[in-house]
Image (cartoon, helix red, strand yellow):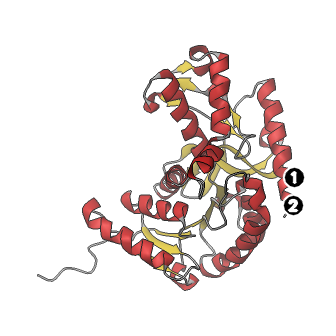
Amino acid sequence: MKIPKTFRSKMAKITIIGAGNVGSQVAFCTALKNLGDVVLLDITDGLAKGKALDILSSMPIAKRDIKIIGTESYDDTKDSDIVIITAGVVRKPGMSRDNLIKTNAKIMSSIIPQILEHSPNSILIIVSNPLDAMVQLAYKLSGFPKERVMGMAGVLDSSRFRTFIAEELNVSVKDIETWVLGGHGDLMVPLIHHSKVKDQALSKIMDEEKLNEVIKRVQNGGSEIVQLLKTGSAFFAPGIATVDMIESILKDEKRILPSTVLLEGEYGVNGLFVGAPARLGRKGVEEVIEFELTDKEKEMFQKSVEHIKSLIEKI
């Protein structure tokens, strides 16, 4: 029986730059969710090809007709719909995300011109650390409109927040809604008064002392994992958090997801990429959602903004 060549409808093209733990996890989850054909790129000889082949070999079990290739050439990324950048050095015990800035800024500066040449109409999602500064740099170097540049951080921080709340209260993560603002790291701002458990305010369910313990753990969630692993950093949660954003964009779901986006007056900030709830659809960032903040939240948010500014000055 002759199989028609058109058995697959046109799929979105998703390029992931960096085939380390995070990048390969993004590739795997993207393929599992059937979101599009995947190009996994890394400058390390054979790394992307090996991981892509491994993922491709798993697709018949997952019953997915997804194409995934590994490559060292940007030519294979041509005309991508979305480009995710995970490339960069990772933290070691005792390091903060900020310690990575010089090296990862150089890597970002080498990647963006290649994206401009091969996929000038793509949407960029930055995952490399320090996240807030890297998104700002990618925006500056690319010249892309603000709608097509964003960073993944808030989805991850919110997921950690929900995880630790569920553990403390012994409830399903499905019943928890949380929101975060600001930079990715220990200055992340949890929006307590907008967070709920089964439609009840979190502040009314969890006592203040326990809530502060949870918040502290969320803010230091990445460091906790780095200390435990000793030779690497988190990748399962960052990977699927990135795919959550990809899915909302490609399916035009217009979901509100906490993302690192350019603020132009929202929350009193101008011209800076900061974590905030944003509506993600086919055009990218389609709207920034403003929540009313308490005085304490405003103070915490301002500290986070000032820290992001100080990081950008180091690039």
Please tell me whether mark 1 sits on a helix, a strand or a loop.
helix
Q: What number is the disc on residue 314?
A: 2
Q: Nearer the viewer, residue 207 or 77?
A: 207
Which amino acid does the dot numbered 2 rest on? Answer: Lys
Q: Residue at x 30, y 72 (%)?
A: 8
| Residue 160 seen by the camera | yes
- Residue 120 vs 301, above or below: the answer is below
Residue receiving disc 1: 310
Q: Quadrant of the C terminus?
A: bottom right
x and y, in percent, of residue 48 in the image? 49, 75
Q: Quadrant of the N terminus?
A: bottom left
Which amino acid does the dot numbered 1 rest on? Answer: Ser
| Residue 65 seen by the camera | no
x and y, in percent, of residue 218 in the image? 63, 37
- The image shows a total of numbered marks equal to 2
Q: Are marks 2 and 1 in contact (CB under 8 Å)?
A: yes
- Residue 154 vs 124, above or below: the answer is above
Q: Residue at x 73, y 42 (%)?
A: 182
Q: What number is the disc on residue 253?
A: none
Q: Residue at x 61, y 72 (%)?
A: 121
x and y, in percent, of residue 212 in the image? 68, 25
Q: Residues within 10 Å of mark 2 (few under 14, many from 20)?
A: few
Q: Nearer the viewer, residue 182 or 49?
A: 49
- Distance from Cα at disc 2 to Cα at disc 1: 7 Å
Q: Quadrant of residue 115?
A: bottom right
Q: Which residue occupies the extreme left position in the image? A: 1
Q: Residue at x 51, y 57 (%)?
A: 246
x and y, in percent, of residue 52 in the image? 42, 73
Q: Residues within 10 Å of mark 1 (few under 14, many from 20)?
A: few
Q: Nearer the viewer, residue 214 or 41?
A: 214
